[in-house]
Image (cartoon, coloured by chain):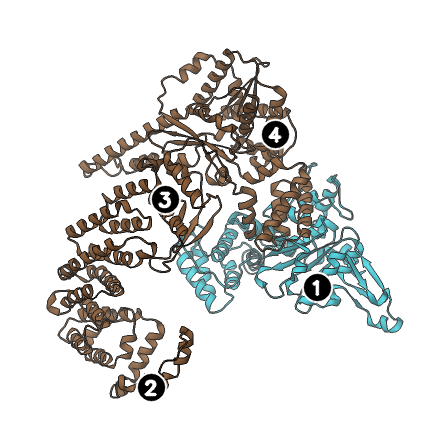
Chain colours: A cyan, B brown
Amino acid sequence: MTMAEEKNGASSRVLRRHAEQQFAEELAELKKADTRPRPEHWELSPWAVCTYLMGGTLENGFEVTPKYIGSRRLMEIAVATLATDRALLLYGVPGTAKSWVSEHLAAAVSGDSTLIIQGTAGTSEEQMRYGWNYAELLAKGPSRNALVESPLMRAMAEGRIARIEELTRIPADVQDTLITILSEKSLPIPELNEEVQAVRGFNVIATANNRDKGVNELSSALKRRFNTVVLPVPATEDEEVAIVEKRVREMGRSLELPAEPPALEEVRRVVRVFRELRNGRTEDGKIKVKTPSGTLSTAEAISVVNSGMALAAHFGDGTLRAGDVAAGLVGAIVKDPVQDRVIWHEYLETVMKERSDWKDLYRACRNVD
Amino acid sequence: MDEDRIRIFGIRHHGPGCARSLSLALEDWQPDCILLEGPPEGESVLSFLADETMVPPVALLVYAEEDARFAAFFPFTEYSPEWRALRYAQEKHIPLRFMDLSAAVDFAEERDREKEALRLAAVAEEQQASGASDVPPGEGDPAPEEAAASEEASAPEEDASSDMPEPSQEPDYPRGSELDELAALAGYENGEAWWNAMIEERLDGLELFEVIRDLMREMRAERERSHAGQPERERRREAHMRTCLRRAKKEGFERIAVICGAWHVPALEADVPARADNACLKGLSRMKVVATWVPWSYADLSMASGYRAGVHSPAWYEHVMRGADMEGRAVSWLTMAARLFREEGLDCSPAHIIESARLAGTLAALRQRPGPGLPELYEALQTVVCMGEEAPMRLIEQRLIIGEKLGHVPEQVPMVPLQKDIERCQKKLRLKPEASQKLLDLDLRQEKDLERSRMLHRLQSLDIPWGTDRREGGGKGTFHELWQLQWEPRLIIDIIRASHWGNTLKKAAEACTKDRASRADLAELVRLVDVALLADLDGIIDDLAERVRERAALATDTLELLSALPELVRLARYGDVRGTDTGMVLTLVEGMVPRVAVGLHAASSGLDEDSSRPLGEALRAVHESLRLMNREDLSSQWHAALRRLIPEESGVHACLRGLATRLLFDDDILSAEEVATQMGLALSPASEPEAAAAWLSSFLGQSAMLLMHDDGLWGMVDAWLAGLSDNQFTAVLPMLRRTFTGFSAPERRQLAERARRAPRSSASAPVGKDAWDEARAVLPLPLLRRMLGLAAEPEAGR
C-alpha cells in the first residue's frame, strides 16, 4: 500500500525516482506508438524496449532519449533473452551500468523496477522465497495471510520482472533456491501445501560483478539457467564522455543543483584521466602509466563530476572549475593511501604536468594533497 | 542489346544464394554458350573438371613462365556461382569461355612497373652516392622516392600470394560506402550483413538477377556522379568482356549466358561501339603464362586472409548452401557447434542448444529478420553457452565460420616436377597437407620419422615454410624434433619458384644451399653445414666442408672462427643420432682448433673492454664445447692458448685475463696457488683499480659460489678491498657493483653475511678435504641409489 502511495504521490520530492517514474512520458509514448506483438504481460514489445534503451525517434516525432550508450546488439540480446524463458545475467566490472540496465529493462518490460532483492552475504532464503509474519502465524496458524511474500514471489504471481542485484554475493546455498524457481517456474509453499506458479511474463534479471569472481561462484546448474551478457567498459573516450555528461545532467536536475551543467571540456578531462589510469596508457598510446587499485569505472567518473558540481554550486561561482573537480578526482583514484598515492603522483608529474592546457587542473590537484 | 540471345547474370564471387539462383536460372534458360568472368588462359585446363577427384575449394593458378612471382589465383568453392557454371557447361557439353582480360597483361604491367621502380631506385642511389652533399636534404632527398619504389617492387609478390584472384576485384561485388548506406537505410549493420540477409541466405530464385542488376545500375550511376569514372584497368577489362561477347554473337550462338561480377553488369549491357573497345585494348604487352589447378583452402578464401574478393564466412556459406530451410539450417549449425565445444571439453548440453536456438530465433524476430542468420546464431551461442565470453567463440570462428577445408585436384593436373616430387614424398611419408595447424613429434630413431624430418628440413632450406621447427635452442632432446605443420595453398607459389633449382626435392635443396654457400661468411657456412646435415644433402656436404676449410684458412678474424666453432662441435657430437656421417665435421673441428689456438693471443691483445666482451662470450662458448667434446689433444692446445693470455705482460685486457684464469681453474689446469698468485697480482695496489675490478668481475663470472666457499679466494678479495684507498674504492665501486648485481639475491645476502663475520672466521680452519665427515656423508647414499635406479649396493662408504 505504502509503496503505491509513494509511487503516485509526490514523486518529485524523493531523492531518486525510479526509472518508470522518471521516464513515464517516454514509456507512455512508446506504448502508444508500439504496434508490434507483445509477449504476454509485457508493457511494450521487445522492439520498443530496445528503442527505449537505445533511444530513437518515434513515428510521431517523439524523441526517446538513450538510456544505455554502447552496443545495440548487447541490448537486443538482453531483451531477446527476457522474451525466452531463460533468466538474464548482466555481468561486468563495477560501474558498467549493470544495475542501470537492469532497472530500465524491468521498467520497460513490466512497468515496475521495484521488485528487487539486494544480494549480500547476509541474504537469507526467506528474502528469496517468503517469510512469516510471526504474530499472525502464532495467533492463527499458517495461512496465506501470515505469509510475507518476497519480491521474487510477487513477480512470479504477477508476471513481472524480478531483479537480483549482486547475485555472486549471495551465499551459494541461498543462490540454489533460484534453481527451482527458474526451471520449474514455481515456488512451493510446503507449510500450506500450496505453490505459487509463475505467470507468463515473469523473468529474472540478475547482476554480478567480475571483480568479485570467486566470492560465491555460481554453480553450473544455476549458470545454465542464465543467459549471460557481459557489459564492457565504454569503448571510446567519446562514448564515455557522452555517458558522463548525460548522467550528470540528469542527476543535476534531480538534485536541483543551481550550478550550470558542466562544460564538456571539464568532463572530457575527468574521463580522460580515468581512462588513462584504467587502461594503463595515455589516450595517444605513447606513454605507459601505472594502474591504481580501484576500478575507476564510469560511475565513479560521474560521481566526481557530480560532487564537483555540488562544490561549484554551493561554494564556488556556479561554474564547474578545475578546483571543484580536483578533490573528487583524488578521492576516487587514491583508494590505497600508499601505493595509489605514488601512482597518482607519477601520473600528475609525468602526464598531467606536460599538457599545457591542463595547468589549472594540475595545480588544483597538487593543492588537494 | 538483344534480350533474346543474351542473358547477363550478375553475381557475387562466392555467394551461396547467387550460386543457387544461378543453377536454377541456367536450367531454365538452357544456354548454348557460357561466358564466364575469368582468365582466358584457364580454358586450357578446363578438361580436368571432369575428373571426380577434383574437389573444391580449388583455385585456378595462372603464373608467368619466366618468373613465378607473377601469379594470380582464381579460387572456386562449391558455392561459387562460377563453379556451378563450369559444372553446368561440362555436364551439358556446351562451350564455356573465360572472357576477362588475360592475366598475362597484368603480369607484363607489373613487371614493367617493377623494372621502372628498380631503375628509379638505382638512379636515386647513384644520385645519393655521387652528390649527397650538393643535394639539399629537403627537396632532392631521394629516400622517400626510393622507399616508395621498393615498396612497389615488392608489391607484386604480395599480390601474387594474397589478393590476386582478380587483382582488382573490389568493385565486382559492390562493397563500398554505397552498399553500407543502403544497408543503414534498411536497418542493417553494414553492407555485408544486408547482402547476406537479402541475397545469400534467401531461398528464392530467378528474379534475383533482375534485382541485382537494377541495384548495380543505381550504384554505378551514383559512383559516376560522385567520383571520376572507373580506373583504367577496369575500363580495359570491361572492354575485353564486351569484345568477347561480340565475338560469341558473331559465331552464331543463340542463347548466350554471361556470368560476371554484379558490378560489371551495367557495363556489359551498355552499348559501346566495337571500335572504342578495340582502341582501349590496343598495344598491350603480355607475358607468357601457364595455367593449372591447385588445391585451395577456406582460410585463404576468407576476407581475413587478405583476399579482397573473399567472403567473411566460407564455412558458414557452405552450410547455407547445403542447409534446407532457415530453421533447419540454424539448428544443424548449432548442433555442429555443440559437438565442437564438447570435443574441446567445454560444457554444452542439448539443453544449451535448444536455448540457443530459441534465443537466436527471438533475436531474429526482434531484428525483423525472416530467420536467424549468422550474427544471431553467434550471439546466441556466446550468450547461452559461453557465459558471454569471447575466447571460446574463437574456436567457432575458426572451425565453423571460416573453416579448415582443403580442396583436392586430380593428379594429372600439370605440375612442375618439383611439386610432383614433393607430393610423392608426402604420400610416401604419410604427411598429408592439412589446412589446420598440427604438431608433429618426430622420433629420429625411427626410420620413417627421420625421413620426415629430412624432408621438412629440405623444404625449409628451399624457403617453403610448410613446417616450422619448434626445436628449443640447439642441443637438448636430440632424439626428438617438434614440427608445427600447416599447409597453405599459396605454398604452391613457393614451390614453383623453387622449382628452377632442381626437379627433385633433394636436388633442389642441394642446389639452393650450394648457391647460398657461395655467398656466405663463415658463420652462415657453418649454419648451412648444419642444414645440409639435417636435410641429409650428402651430395654437397663435401663441397660445403671444403668451403668451410677454405674460409677458415683465409679467415683473418679469429672471432669469426671462435663463433663458428661451438656450432661445429655441436654438429660433430650430435650428428650421429641422425645417422649422418659426421666424420667430415670432426675433421673440420680438428682443423680449426689449432688455428684458433694460434690466433687467440694476437686476436685478444690490444683490445679495450668493449671489444673484449664479445670475444669473452665466444671464449666461454668454445671452452664449453671443447670440454664436452672431451678430446685430450684438442683441449691441451686450447688450454695452452688460454694460458698465454693470463700474464699481465700479454697485453690482453684484464677482463679476458680474468676469464682465462677462471676457465683454466675450472678445468683444474691452474692450481689454487697459481690462481691465488694471479689474483694477488691482478688486484695488487699497483694495478689500475678499473683493470683490477674488470679482472675480478670476469673471474667471478655469473656465480658467487666460488667466492663463498673458497676461503683462500675470499681472504684475497677481502684483503684487496680493505686495502683500497678511499679514492680507489670510489673508482672501482661501479665495477664491483656490476659484478655483484650479476649474482642472485640469496647469493648476495650470503656474501654479505659472510663479510660481516669475516674478521672472526678468517682465522678459523679452512674447509678442506680434512673436514669430510664420512659417517654423515654416507647417510644419503641409499636414497641416491634409489633415485638413480642402482639396484646393487656396493661397498658402503668410500
Of the residues shown, which amino acid type is indicated by label 3? Leu
Tag 4, which chain? B
**Residue that label 4 marks:** B20
For the residues tagged 1 and 2, is the chain the same? Answer: no
Position of B643 with respect to A43 (left or right) is: left
- Camera-nearest label, 3 or 4: 3
* Residue B428, x across and y down, in percent: 43, 44
For the residues tagged 1 and 3, is the chain the same? Answer: no
**Residue that label 2 marks:** B774
**Residue that label 3 marks:** B459
Image height check: is B93 above or below B201? Answer: above
On residue B732, which mark appears? none
Viewport quadrant of the N terminus of chain B: top right
Q: Is residue B234 visible?
A: no
Q: Quadrant of residue A173?
A: bottom right
Which circle's residue, 2 or 3, is located before the other in the chain? 3
- Give the distance between the C-alpha atoms of the residues marked 1 and 3, in whole angstroms: 59 Å
- Give the distance between the C-alpha atoms of the residues marked 1 and 2, in whole angstroms: 65 Å
* Callout 1: SS: loop
- Give the distance between the C-alpha atoms of the residues marked 3 and 4, in whole angstroms: 41 Å
- Give the distance between the C-alpha atoms of the residues marked 2 and 3, in whole angstroms: 59 Å
Q: Are marks 1 and 2 in contact (CB under 8 Å)?
A: no
* Callout 4: SS: helix
